[in-house]
Image (tube, grey):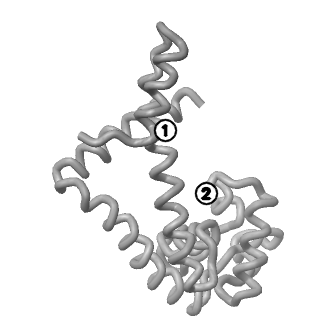
Amino acid sequence: MATDDVDVIVEQWRRERAGMRPEPMAVFGRIYRLARLVGDDQEKVYAGWGISRGEFDVLAALRRSGEPYALAPKALTAALMLTSGGMTGRLDRLERAGLVRRTPDPADRRGLRIVLTDAGRRVVEESVDAGLAVQRRILDALPPDDQAHLADLLRTLLAAAEQGA
């Protein structure tokens, strides 16, 4: 098996700090690098639709919510783990682009709902396929059984991290 930059870092720590157990760096260093590389590729893909990855996340959350493709800002903020200020900026940009609109909440006259426009629906449905193609290109380096096993292992690690948070 070939070595990579993470192997070099781990080995340097082993050399410089005898007794240190840097094995977690081998896992998380690769997770971080993989997320950055794939994220950067997806950012380039989404730019073709005039949106950022963060804006895609908002459109995707609305689309996944099902008809009428509308959520309260608080629900979007919670789903995407953002601050209200971060969400407001994204919503402002998406609204200016005509991809979402703010409407009164029929169940709460003080509240708002964020609604995916027809243009927003087209953008998210086209861009999600392009984003998945980026992910598939990387995952195709593994056989399907290994992909499923990796997803299971990462689910376990994510649950442990969320429990500790």
Task: Report the residue marked by disc 1.
Answer: 29
- Whether residue 76 is situated above or below residue 112 in the rendered picture: above
165 sits to left or right of 37: right
Q: Where is residue 53 in the image (x, y as percent from the top left)?
A: 59, 68
Q: In which quarter of the image is residue 5?
A: top left
Element on which disc 1 rests: helix
Element on which disc 2 rests: helix
Amino acid type assigned to the residue bearing label 2 in the image: Leu
Binning the other alpha carbons within 10 Å of mark 2 as few (below 14), some (14 to 19) or many (20 upward) gives few
17 sits to left or right of 139: right
Verify CB contact (< 8 Å) between mark 1 and mark 2.
Answer: no
In front of the other: label 1 or label 2? 1
Q: Where is residue 83 in the image (x, y as percent from the top left)?
A: 75, 54
In the displayed orientation, state which residue is furthest to the top.
Answer: 19
- Whether residue 113 is situated above or below residue 1 in the rendered picture: below
- Whether residue 127 is situated above or below residue 30 in the rendered picture: below
Binning the other alpha carbons within 10 Å of mark 1 as few (below 14), some (14 to 19) or many (20 upward) gives some
Count of marks overlaid on the render: 2
Task: Report the residue marked by disc 2.
Answer: 80
- Whether residue 17 is situated above or below residue 69 in the rendered picture: above
Amino acid type assigned to the residue bearing label 1 in the image: Gly
Query: Looking at this view, is 21 or 84 the one in front?
Result: 21
The disc label shown at residue 121, or none: none
Which quadrant would the N terminus be assigned to in this image? Answer: top left
User: Which residue lies at the image location 64% right of the left edge and 62% below the top edge?
Assistant: 76
Whichever of labels 1 and 2 marks the residue nearer the N terminus, that label is: 1
Q: Where is residue 18 in the image (x, y as percent from the top left)?
A: 49, 9
